[in-house]
Amino acid sequence: MRAYTQRRSILKGIRKRFSKRGVILMYHSIAATQADPWCITVTPQNFADHLKVLQQFGKPISLTDFAHGMARGELPQRAIALTFDDGYANNLEVAKPLLEQYDIPATVFVASGYLDQNREFWWDELAQLLLTPGLLPAQLALEVNGHTQKWHLGAAQTYTEAMAQQDSCCLVESAEPGSRLALYGQLWQALLHLPFAMRQQTLDALWVWADRSPQVRSAYRPLRSDELLPLEQSGHVSVGGHTVTHSMLSRLSTEEQFQEIYQCKVDLEVKLGHVIHSFAYPFGNYSPTTVPCVAEAGFSHACSTIVDTAWSRYDAYQLPRFEAQNWSGPELVRRLRRLFW
Ligand SMILES: [Zn+2]
């Protein structure tokens, strides 16, 4: 049995080695921000350097062309597709002019429920509340899903400029226990699994607890619906779907999943005046029932967060991606060399 498995794995490796492979890169926000506990923000300078590298090193193509080429086993040599998740306004203000300058196409996946809400994405709002310098109450009691959870903040009650500076390039997974960043991680987990309305209520309760009001900061602002057409105007950017509320799809019933996926498509198509084809799973999270919902809603392909090069083994509704981080140009070259062998 083991020999059989080994043989299959070797054969798969050989098939992959000689298949036409490409890379789909996943970006989120292009900005010079301070709090970035998930390291999802790339500075405009590094992003410009990435585009220069991609133009020299690869063959940037649209995600739709990429999905079609992959399905037919006809991906161009070193094909690369760029994607942006969530729908940050800086994709229009900062990324789009650079994409035009380097003549590189990209797809921006938009969570339609955040358009015109005049609120930041919930994970950014939570970071605004916890990871900006200031003093918080000593204790927190939060009702989550009918259970009261309690936190004693201890040292995390205080948060200084120096701490914020230190955390600006620190992943939440490596937070020191008892730190403000660790508290952010715990509350993020608590909010992640809540239904949308309950999550917003819980966030509101947190602002009351902190005795502060949420702001919409320009570097973290979600797109408005009147910015979707300008985003696509030059033909470099295509809008794709990313659900309505950016929830964990696997936690929802099949009907709720379909509603999230289909309604997002309808919302975006009404605003854009044309059909959209691409979808990305929020948090890369989905269950076996999600994929048929995406197809049934009318999307022709979907991006996951499976970390791999894309080749004919992958089906069009589970395209793998690599998360691009705030690397320098030379660092991106090193990583692409490894991917393309
Ligand atoms: Zn997302």
Image: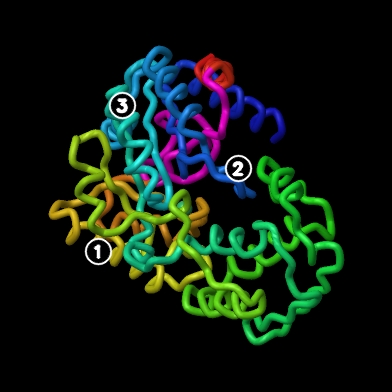
Choose the circle earlier in sequence order: 3 or 2.
Answer: 2
Task: Tell me the tag on residue 267.
Answer: 1
Choose the circle earlier in sequence order: 3 or 1.
Answer: 3
- Relative vertical location of residue 127 with respect to residue 326 in this rendering, above or below: below
Name which residue lies at 18% across and 41% down. Answer: 233
Name which residue lies at 20% across and 49% down. Answer: 229
Question: What kind of residue is marked 2?
Answer: Cys
Q: Residues within 10 Å of mark 2 (few under 14, many from 20)?
A: some
> Is disc 2 in contact with disc 1, using a CB cutoff of under 8 Å?
no
Q: Position of residue 199 (x, y in %)?
A: 54, 74
Q: Quadrant of the C terminus?
A: top right
Q: Position of residue 107 (x, y in %)?
A: 33, 40
Name which residue lies at 82% across and 51% down. Answer: 176
Between marks 3 and 2, how big is the CA–CA gap?
23 Å
Q: Position of residue 211 (x, y in %)?
A: 63, 77
Does the magenta run of residues contain 324?
yes
Question: What kind of residue is marked 1?
Answer: Asp
Q: Quadrant of residue 61?
A: top left
Choose the circle earlier in sequence order: 2 or 1.
Answer: 2
Q: Nearer the viewer, residue 284 or 234?
A: 234
Between marks 3 and 1, how big is the CA–CA gap?
26 Å
Task: Tell me the tag on residue 104.
Answer: 3
Between marks 2 and 1, how big is the CA–CA gap?
29 Å
Q: Position of residue 46 (x, y in %)?
A: 50, 27
**Range drawn in magenta:** 303-329
Q: Residues within 10 Å of mark 1 (few under 14, many from 20)?
A: some
Q: Nearer the viewer, residue 121 or 60?
A: 121
Q: Residues within 10 Å of mark 3 (few under 14, many from 20)?
A: many
Q: What kind of element bears circle 3?
A: loop
Q: What kind of element bears circle 1?
A: helix
Residue position for label 2: 39
Q: Nearer the viewer, residue 114 or 14?
A: 114
